[in-house]
Amino acid sequence: MFTTINLFESILIIYGLSVVSYFIDFIQHSRKANRIAFWLLCMVLLMQTLFLLYQIIWNKSFPLGTLVDSLFFYSWILVLFSIIMNVLHENQFIMLLTNIFGFLILLLHTSNMAWNDMKLNGIQFANDILITHVTLTIVSYGFFTLSFIFSIAYLIHYRLLKRKKQLKWTKKVGNLSKLDVFSFGAVTIGTPLLLIGLMLGFVWAFVSNDEFYWFDMKTIGSLFVFVFYIIYLVLRMMKGYQGKTIAIFNTAAFLLLLVNFFLFSLLSNFHF
C-alpha cells in the first residue's frame, strides 16, 4: 500500500535529481541541466503543495504544530524561494546551496516521520535509505573511476606526445582536450551523487537503531574523498588548472578513494 513515507521517498528522489542537475549547471554552466533541474524542482513543489493542501483541507491542520511539521513547511518555503530565484536568474551558487539545504531539511523531516512510526514504515524507510546510500556512493565511485581512467589516458598520451611517439590505441581515445573534458565531466556528476549518498548515510545512522561511530575510519575516509574532489573542482573552476596538473591531482584523489574503499572498510566498525 502506498503510504505517506512512500510519497516523501518519491519527492526526495525527484529533489535529489534536481540537486544533481543544479550542481552540473553550476560547474559547467549548462542551460539544459538548469532547465531539467528547474522542472524537477517544480514537480517537488507541486507534490509538496498537494500534500500541504491535503493537510489543511482534509485533516484541518496547518503543518506548524510540531518540529517535524515545521521541517516540512520549512522545506516547502525553500523550494518555493528556489523556483523564484531560478526565474529571476539569481546567483547559481546561492541556488545550489539553497537546494542542498532544502533537500537536507526535507530528508530530516521524512526521517523524523519514519522515526515516529518505527514499527513498520520507519524500518522500511531505514532500509530504503541504506540501499540508496550504498547505491549512490558506489555509482559515484563508478564516475570517479571513469574520470581516473580518462586522466591516466591523458597522462600516457601526453607523455607519448612529448617523446614524439604515438601508438595505434592513442588515436582511438581522442585528443588531449577531449580526455580532459571527459574526466572533468565524470567528476562533475560523481561529486553531487557522493554528497547525497553521504547525507543519506548520516540520516540512516540517525533513523536506524544501529550504533554509529562518528570517528569511524570509513566515515572519515569518505568525507576526505568528497573534500578532495571538491578541491579538484575548485582548482579546475577558480584556479584554471587543466591538463597534466589536474590529471595528476585527479589520480591522487582516486588513490585516496581506493584506500578508503578497501583499507578503511577493513578498519571500520560497521561498514563491510
Image: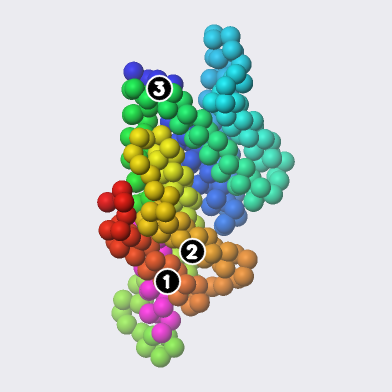
Q: Point out the tag, 1 or 3, that comes first from the N-terminus.
A: 3
Q: Position of residue 7 (x, y in %)?
A: 44, 25
Instruction: Determine which residue is flagged by label 3.
Output: 117
Instruction: Determine which residue is flagged by label 1.
Output: 252
User: Which amino acid type is shown beneath numbered disc 3?
Assistant: Asp
In this picture, which residue range is highlighted in magenta?
Answer: 142-159
- In this rendering, the count of numbered labels is 3
Asked if residue 51 shows in the view, the reply is: yes
Q: Which mark is residue 228?
A: 2
Q: Nearer the viewer, residue 115 or 230?
A: 115
Q: Is residue 261 depicted above or below 110 in this figure?
A: below
Q: Is residue 41 depicted above or below 155 in this figure?
A: above
- Residue at horizontal 60 percent and vertical 47 percent from the top: 96
- Residue at horizontal 59 percent and vertical 53 percent from the top: 26
- Frontmost of labels 3 and 2 is 3
- Sort mark 3 into few (<14), some (14-19) or many (20+) by Cα contacts within 10 Å: some
Q: Is residue 70 depicted above or below 169 in this figure?
A: above
Residue 152 on the magenta span:
yes
Mark 1 to mark 3: distance in Å?
44 Å
User: Which amino acid type is shown beneath numbered disc 1?
Assistant: Ala
- Frontmost of labels 1 and 3 is 3
- Sort mark 2 into few (<14), some (14-19) or many (20+) by Cα contacts within 10 Å: many
Q: Position of residue 262 (x, y in %)?
A: 29, 61
Q: Are marks 2 and 1 in contact (CB under 8 Å)?
A: yes
Mark 2 to mark 1: distance in Å?
9 Å
Q: Are marks 3 and 2 in contact (CB under 8 Å)?
A: no
Q: Point out the tag, 2 or 1, that comes first from the N-terminus.
A: 2
Q: Point out the tag, 3 or 2, that comes first from the N-terminus.
A: 3
| Colouring mode (rainbow / by chain / secondary structure / one colour) | rainbow
